[in-house]
Image: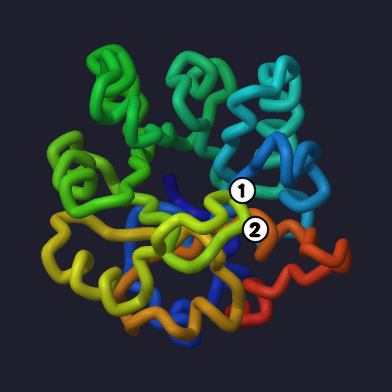
Amino acid sequence: MTLANPSRRLNSTVCGLSAWAGPPLILVTDDVRLPDPLAAAAALPSGSGVLLRHYGDPARAARAAALAALCRRRRLVLLVAGDWRLAARLGAAGLHLPEGIARHGVLAPALGWLRRRHALLTVAAHSPLALGRAAALGADAALVSPVFPSRSHPGAPVVGPLRLGGWRRRARLPLIALGGVSAATARRLPRGSVCGLAAIEGLSGVSRSGQGERDVLTLGID
């Protein structure tokens, strides 16, 4: 999918991002930490991405439809997690596979839709083995997490910048950093190690204190 209005894209020179077919900046929705993602999505620069998770939301279909309409108006790239049929109904730009689905799911129908639609595929990865699986599926990029300490995975071991750089050198596909990503932590990533930055709080204006901090955007917009 061609990204609209490239002058409003994240400044890859400032961030040291490598290239991939999708957006350099991705807002990740969360039914607990970001129950209504519309306002956060509306504040993104054109050409950014939105990854719809909201797995446990009973109103997921309706919320997804509203988010898809907003993405069309704002020229954002919509990815739907775990449900290729919903992605197809919404006319989404791509599909995201959680690591468990990538490992054990029945993927032929989803992969068929992706090929016919020429849509983006991202896959979650928490290990080099998962990165290999994502590459074997033909994913456009892998979302690696948690790169830094994150409220989504409190106390969980983190990948960290150095290990991420090593994974990138051996990976056969581009990597997107997720987990604790902020303006400060993104600058700690090895230059060229990731093609994108994904975040919930770092892009939603929601912080532990409740104060707005949409700080990933402070890395610079072209």
Q: Residue at x 87, y 62 (%)?
A: 210
Outermost residue, front side:
155
Residue 47 visible at all: no
Asked if 10 appears above or below 80 in the picture, the reply is below
Residue carrying label 2: 46
Please identify the quarter of the rendering in which residue 18 is found.
bottom left
Residue 123 visible at all: yes
User: Residue 184: percent from the left, percent from the top?
Assistant: 58, 83
- Where does the C terminus fall, quadrant-wise? bottom right
User: Residue 102: percent from the left, percent from the top?
Assistant: 28, 30
Asked if 103 appears above or below 184 in the picture, the reply is above
Three-letter code, disc 1 = Leu
User: Residue 186: percent from the left, percent from the top?
Assistant: 50, 77
Residue 60 located left or right of residue 1: right
Residue carrying label 1: 76
Three-letter code, disc 2 = Ser
Asked if 89 appears above or below 54 in the picture, the reply is above
Q: Residue at x 74, y 57 (%)?
A: 204
Q: In terms of depth relative to the viewer, which is nearer, 39 or 186?
A: 186
Contact flag, marks 1 and 2 (Cβ < 8 Å): yes
Q: Residue at x 49, y 84 (%)?
A: 187
Residue 101 located left or right of residue 12: left
The image's colouring method is rainbow
Residue 128 located left or right of residue 56: left
